Image (cartoon, rainbow, N blue to C red):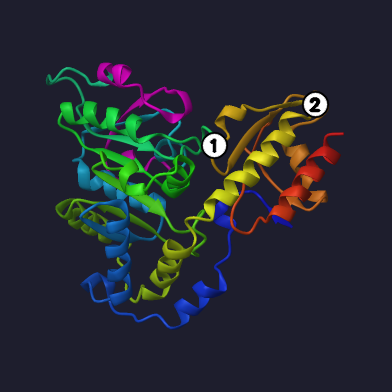
Amino acid sequence: MIDLRSDTKTLPTPEMREAMARAECGDDVGREDPTVNRLEEMAAARLGKEAACFVTSGTQGNLTSLMAHTRPGQAIIAHEQAHILVYEQGGYARIAGLALYPVPGKYGDLDPEALQGVFPPREIHRVQPGVVCLENTHNVCGGTVLTARQIAAVAAVAHEHGVPLHIDGARIFNAAIALGMPAAELVAAADSITFCFSKGLGAPVGSIVCGEAGFVERVRWARKVLGGGLRQAGIIAAAAIVALETMVDRLADDHAHSRQIAETLAALPGIEIDLNSIQTNIIRFSVVRDDLSAPQLCDCLKERGVLGSPVSDTAIRLVTHADVSARDTETVCDALKDALA
């Protein structure tokens, strides 16, 4: 099967498996794991930040960041379709004790002028924001990219109001590759950022939080209370190091495969797709036929050896990744043409 349900479906490469087998380990809770320490130093340097903390997942990375930036009773400002809001079980409210100011925005961006109007007056009746959040690339909007200029504009508004900017950068290297610029330059204006090793970079597990050293120390405390204290984590950190060293530049292939599939879809009857949103490795499109639903189309594709994700009765998400080759992409295009004939 060609699995396009998510880039989390990637399998570790032989080089990752070898690195895991020979990883030097120690107790990471006591900062004694040399492989984790090396990974954190590498990640912080790669993102242009002072320090980093290895966490088990992007969800844990975002939640620990929110906890480190805020105090209970404050609010987060985020795009109305942000992953933090839609797919992380409301941890910002259930665990961090935060309220929410959701903001609309084209392709995941927050318009600086509109953002100014979200901040409430500083008076006793109003919940005060503690952090502004962006997502880059933006999952629900179709893997769309925010530029360094867009990030800096949002950061300027946040900082004007005395709050930090956090970026959910699960796929930040997809964004950097799409823009042709270093990730550190892209996120320079942000106070903190998370990114995932287990999506486009293909490692089996893990994410990381980067930021100023004092902030990262608070993240480490938050990680522990969430049950994320790691012991001999060098085994998984070793795979993440290989991912960071070998899997970033090849993301351009995923973007090319995604574009090819999207252009095939655009030419097929009964399909609606916004080609302007196809900027990285995520494809979202709608089935607009009375005789065919999104789940039914996914069933048809499965019969032809392709797995996709229906996200509603009419919408489907496909995601390219390291385990989807150029030949696989041709097969996917042929399967779509056949299923929609």
Question: Residue 220, position in %: x, y?
Answer: 23, 59
Q: Quadrant of residue 20?
A: bottom left
Q: Which residue is located at x 24 percent, y 76 percent?
A: 32
Q: Which residue is mark 2?
A: 269
Q: Was residue 105 drawn as part of the magenta stretch in this picture?
A: yes
Query: Closest to the observer: 265 or 56?
Result: 265
Task: Farthest residue to the front: give it.
Answer: 180
Picture coordinates of residue 115, whole percent (x, y): 30, 21
Q: Give the residue drawn at x 37%, y 48%.
A: 182
Q: Which mark is residue 61?
A: none
- Where 124 sits versus 210, above or below? above
Cα gap from disc 2 to disc 1, whole angstroms: 22 Å
Task: Give the amino acid type for the residue marked by disc 2 in the picture.
Answer: Pro
**Image location (x, y in percent) of residue 137:** 45, 40
Residue 290 visible here: yes
Q: Residue at x 80, y 30 (%)?
A: 292
Looking at the image, residue 4 sits to the left or right of residue 47; the answer is right
Tell me which segment is drawn in magenta: 88-117
For label 2, the crowd category at 10 Å Cα-Cα, with few meaning under 14, some 14 to 19 and many 20 or more, is few
Quadrant of the image containing the C terminus: top right
Disc sitting over residue 279 in the figure? 1
Q: Secondary structure at mark 1?
A: loop
